[in-house]
Structures are given as C-alpha cells and as structure tokens.
C-alpha cells in the first residue's frame, strides 16, 4: 500500500503534511507536487531547479519511497528531481507492530489500549448522546436538562 500527496501544491507547501504522514503511516509514501502554485495566468513558475531544491527536504529526511511530478512540471523538472534524489535512500518502512485503530476527525484518535475478545483494537461508539441520533437526548439538551443528559452519557459508558 502507498499513501501520499498529489497535486494542488508545490513541494515547499507540502512539507508539513508530508512530514506528518511520514511519521505515522506504516506503508510506502509518495509525493507528486506541482511546479509551485499557479500564478495569476494559470501557469506555474517553479523551474526544474526550484522543484528539485524543494523536493530535496523530503529526501534528506527519508520521508519518501516515490516521487513524481504534477501540474506545471515537464521532463526537465523530473530530470532535476531525479538528480537531487540520487544520493539519498528511500524511506524505511516502520516495523509492523500490533494492529491499532486510527480514527480521524479534528484530531486523530489512536485506539490501541482497548481490545475485544479476539485481541484486536475495539472502540464502542454509542449514539445515545447524539442529538441527531436520539430524540430523547435532543429534547433534554433543548430543555437545558444537562443533569439527565449526563445520566444518559454515564449509562452509555457503563454499558
């Protein structure tokens, strides 16, 4: 399996996202950046040298297994990126550990300390405290009856 970023940004703008992904994914990583951001005329201004320089940070940190090009780049761009990558090793895949459940949202949630009867990560997500999933809970919240709503939440945790 491989994950990564493609298009929308130049390599210099992808750095924080690539770094975050490289620190957490357990598979191959790739980047196919644009030749910078589009200019006012819809073109791209990064030269092959610019693109090679901006991709070099990925190579220096060992974040990638594959690199390519996207909007605004040309064969000379890929030639410059290839030359910039030659002295670096590909990203080492992390050791495979116990499976974990990784959920996304405003902040990520890793569930690796709660397991089911099979020994696999498990998280019971209840709907009792969701105003779109429980009419009773919605009515309590609309009425400002937080104490009874809290009782529902406590019961959900106990169950």
Image: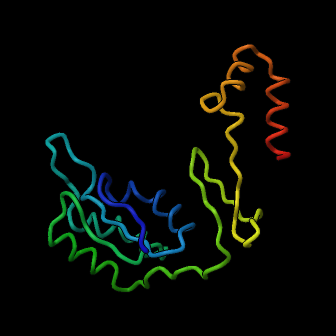
- Image check: 150 left or right of 43? right
- Image check: 78 left or right of 33? left
Q: How is the image coloured?
A: rainbow
Q: Quadrant of the N terminus?
A: bottom left
- Residue situated in front as seen by the camera: 12 or 101: 101
- Residue situated in front as seen by the camera: 151 or 99: 151
Count of marks overlaid on the render: 0
Q: Is residue 129 above or below residue 33?
A: above
- The answer to which image quadrant residue 141 occupies is top right
Q: Is residue 55 above or below residue 8?
A: below
- Image check: 91 left or right of 86? right
The location of residue 115, given as percent across then percent down, is 75, 66
Residue depicted at x 70% and y 43%: 126
Extreme top residue here?
143
The location of residue 39, given as percent across then percent down, is 20, 45
The location of residue 107, given as percent across then percent down, is 61, 48
Residue depicted at x 70% and y 61%: 122
- The answer to which image quadrant residue 140 occupies is top right
Residue depicted at x 85% and y 23%: 147
The location of residue 94, given as percent across then percent down, is 57, 79
Residue depicted at x 61% and y 60%: 102
- Residue situated in front as seen by the camera: 46 or 153: 153
- Residue situated in front as seen by the camera: 62 or 111: 111
């Amino acid at each position: 399996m491989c994950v990564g970023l493609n298009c929308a940004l130049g390599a210099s703008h992808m750095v924080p996202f690539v770094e975050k992904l490289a620190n957490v994914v357990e598979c191959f990583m790739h980047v196919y950046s644009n030749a910078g951001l589009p200019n006012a005329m819809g073109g791209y201004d990064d030269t092959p040298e610019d693109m090679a320089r901006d991709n070099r940070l990925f190579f220096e940190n060992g974040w990638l297994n594959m690199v390519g090009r996207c909007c605004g780049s040309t064969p000379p761009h890929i030639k410059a990126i290839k030359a910039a990558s030659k002295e670096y090793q590909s990203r080492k895949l992390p050791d495979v550990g116990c499976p974990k459940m990784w959920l996304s949202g405003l902040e990520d949630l890793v569930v690796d300390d709660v397991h089911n009867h099979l020994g696999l990560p498990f998280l019971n997500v209840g709907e009792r405290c969701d105003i779109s999933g429980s009419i009773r809970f919605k009515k309590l919240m609309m009425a400002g009856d937080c104490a009874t709503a809290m009782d529902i939440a406590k019961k959900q945790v106990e169950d």
